[in-house]
Amino acid sequence: MSSKLEKQKQLLNEELEEILTPLCNTTDLFELIRNILMVEGRDPTSTNSQKPWPLLPLVVADSISGNCEHVVPAAAAIQLLMAAGDVFDDIEDSDVSDSISSKYGTAIAANTGTTLLILAEKALTRLNNRGINNETTLRVIEKINSFFTNACIGQHLDLSLARSVLNEGQYLDIVKLKSASQIECCCHAGAALSTIDNMVVDLFSVFGQNLGIMAQFSNDIVGVITKKDIIRRKPTLPMFFGFSHSDDKSRSILEKAFNPSCLNEVSTDQVKNVLFSSGGIQYTSLKMSFHRELAKETHYALEHRGISVRQLMEFLN
Ligand SMILES: CC(C)=CCC/C(C)=C/CC/C(C)=C/COP(=O)(O)OP(=O)(O)O
């Protein structure tokens, strides 16, 4: 991790520590929430393949204005909202054995998720301490809430349509709403708090959306390789491609794999083989590259406007 990213990480962690202060002498809720904030993709210190998404608002702000301290409360709020989304997702999907709901039950998990939401709202009011005027603060709060409303709509579609026969286009719409909107939110907030140039804000939003789609497709590939999504019967892009590009025998394997009434009729290895041999994995990887190129295009446009995007490139690898 570069020294700049280290400093940004430290700023964000200090902000979160302050936001969590009201909980520290009360109950074990403090430790619970601290641990949630440290999981993959939420922990800005993470060095594994998951990107440190909560640092994105700081990186974006720094690339625009050479400073990032003014966006730290927004980054903290988004990190808390994303963590809340994960806690609720684990309750709703009930498919993760080490989730808060599996370990402590639905009641504790629901209260933990609610606490994260309230702390996120509190974090946003701290923007005023960083010299952000009321008008900008309100505008950014409204945008952040809109992105997360989209995440809720995407989650609803995902939950209600999971067992229907979707096509690739519908799946992409859900991905944009449920997952990409959150990464887009990180980029949008970082930019909207750092410039009044709407074109720059829009370019960063487009960058964030493509980054978010890439992240979901990468997750889809990992879900097949590790067989996690096959075991959970979770329809993802490799599966949609496999369905429409397989012979009858392979398609029948996929149909059985995603049909709960055909439990154990096909093995996870059979399904994984079909998803590879149909080209589903290569296709998903190509789609990732396509969205990486779209993200890069916004970079060129931003550089053209004198904004250095060097640090952001790390998020594309
Ligand atoms: C409170 C709040 C901010 C709510 C937003 C709505 C919500 C619960 C969104 C879910 C977010 C998300 C990307 C979950 C993981 O998806 P997945 O189940 O496809 O991935 P997984 O493999 O990580 O479970």
Image (spheres, helix red, strand yellow):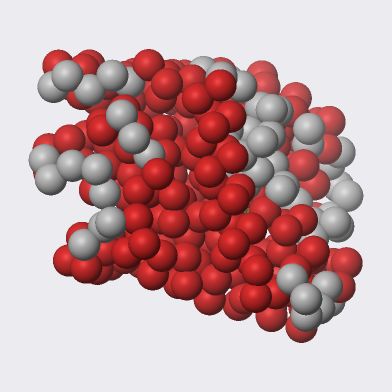
Does 11 sit left or right of 231 as displayed?
left
Nearest to the observer: residue 63 or residue 290: 63
Nearest to the observer: residue 247 or residue 143: 143
Q: Position of residue 127 (x, y in %)?
A: 35, 61
Observer able to see residue 107:
yes
Q: Is residue 300 above or below residue 124?
A: above
Q: Position of residue 3 (x, y in %)?
A: 56, 21
Observer able to see residue 159:
no
Nearest to the observer: residue 98 or residue 63: 63
Does 101 sit left or right of 40 as displayed?
right
Q: How many marks?
A: 0
> In the displayed image of the protein, which residue is found farthest to the bottom?
107
Does 22 sit left or right of 151 as displayed?
right
Q: Position of residue 136 (x, y in %)?
A: 20, 60
Residue at the image position 59 percent from the left and 40 percent from the top: 10
Q: Is residue 144 above or below residue 233?
A: below
Ligand 1's quadrant = bottom right
Residue at the image position 59 percent from the left and 57 percent from the top: 16
Q: Looking at the rendering, which quadrant does residue 202 occupy?
A: top left
Residue at the image position 45 percent from the left and 72 percent from the top: 121
Q: Can you say which quadrant of the picture contains the N terminus?
A: top right
Residue at the image position 69 percent from the left and 42 percent from the top: 40
Q: Position of residue 306 (x, y in %)?
A: 17, 19
Q: Is residue 146 above or below residue 168?
A: below
